[in-house]
Image: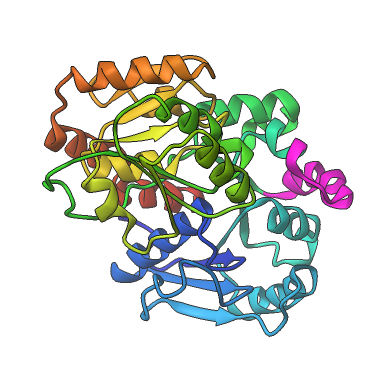
Amino acid sequence: MKHGNKKILFFLPSFKGGGAEQVFIRLLNYLTKNNFKASVFINRNKGEHLGRLHKEVKSHYSLIQRLPFAVFQFIIHAWLKKPDIIYVTLTYPLAVIGLLRSLFPKSTIMVGRVTNLYSQELKNINNLFIKKVLPVALNNFDKIICQSDDMKEDLTKNMNSLNKKIHVINNPTPENDFKNFERSGFICVGRLCEQKNYKLVIKAFASIKEELDIYGIGPEEKKLLNLAKNLNCKNIKFRGFSNNILEKISKSKALIVTSNFEGFSNVILEALSCGTPIISKEFLGGKNEILNSKNSISFDSDDPKHLVDAVESFNQKKFEHIFIAQEAQKKYGIEKIASQYLGLIE
């Protein structure tokens, strides 16, 4: 892989349990392991992924917790290190860092990685200042990473000025050996929020005599617990956050995805890397790029009966777990994805 002498700097807001943080951690671990000059500036040294960054990764921690002020410390850090390229992800850092692009070294390539469908992300931003400056900030980046063709299409539809800056780079699969466990029950993994639409899977499993484990935390937790209780869903267990989620996925018959939209689902990639097939609702955000008839069953509405039917179809079909894992690694392996990130230096 080229660019071994180039200096690469990532901005990581925290170690929260989101997919964006996970992707940067995987890239940093891989690049450091393979002797690239990669380092990271971390705003807050806390979160569910704390401890997953290898000790060999060169890390600099902000002395200031509040993001707007921490960015000025990041600017000073960038001038001291003079990296060839900087990668930034998540909406708030993109807005603040992009807005202050002129304060960073001009020789540094600034790359912004958006994390969701832009049109949907705008609806979810509560901070009016961030919502107003985000379009300006994105335009200030030298290059933009979208994780799927759906994301690129949605972003250019809203901001055509970015069209020539956008590069579609998928997320990487994790490196793991969890492919041959005996499998039973179904699993959902992700933040307990409206976007993930877990009320659909709970309503469906109220009439399915199968075990379902839901892993994740989030603002909808209380509502979902009450819904499961009211529907007498004794077969559904809320497991919270897990530090060994790949093992849990590997022991499940299938991952169930009911999202309204995604950027490019990390948990789907994690499941496929374990050889675990997917039962998924149709959604925008990379689904058609990742899933096919050999690794998934799809359904197309929020009617719980359609998910019930999809589970029945799944139980009648045989999936080749090793083939699923090998195909995912071939298409989304960390070496391939890292080379695409490094290709942005040119």
The location of residue 311, given as percent across then percent down, is 31, 22
The location of residue 298, given as percent across then percent down, is 38, 19
In the image, residue 63 sits, relative to residue 320, either above or below, namely: below
Name the one closer to the observer, 109 or 281.
281
For the record, the magenta segment spans 123-141
Name the one closer to the observer, 21 or 228.
228
- Quarter containing the N terminus: bottom left
Disc count in the image?
0
* Residue visible at 77% across and 45% down in the picture: 125
**Residue 126 in magenta stretch:** yes
**Residue 298 in magenta stretch:** no
The reply to whether residue 162 is visible in this rendering is yes
* Residue visible at 52% across and 16% down in the picture: 303
The location of residue 119, given as percent across then percent down, is 71, 31
The location of residue 267, given as percent across then percent down, is 40, 44
Indicate left or right for 241 with 100 as reference.
Answer: left
Name the one closer to the observer, 293 or 279.
279
Indicate left or right for 180 with 262 as reference.
Answer: left
Please name the predominant secondary structure of the magenta segment in the image.
helix
Indicate left or right for 268 with 79 as reference.
Answer: left
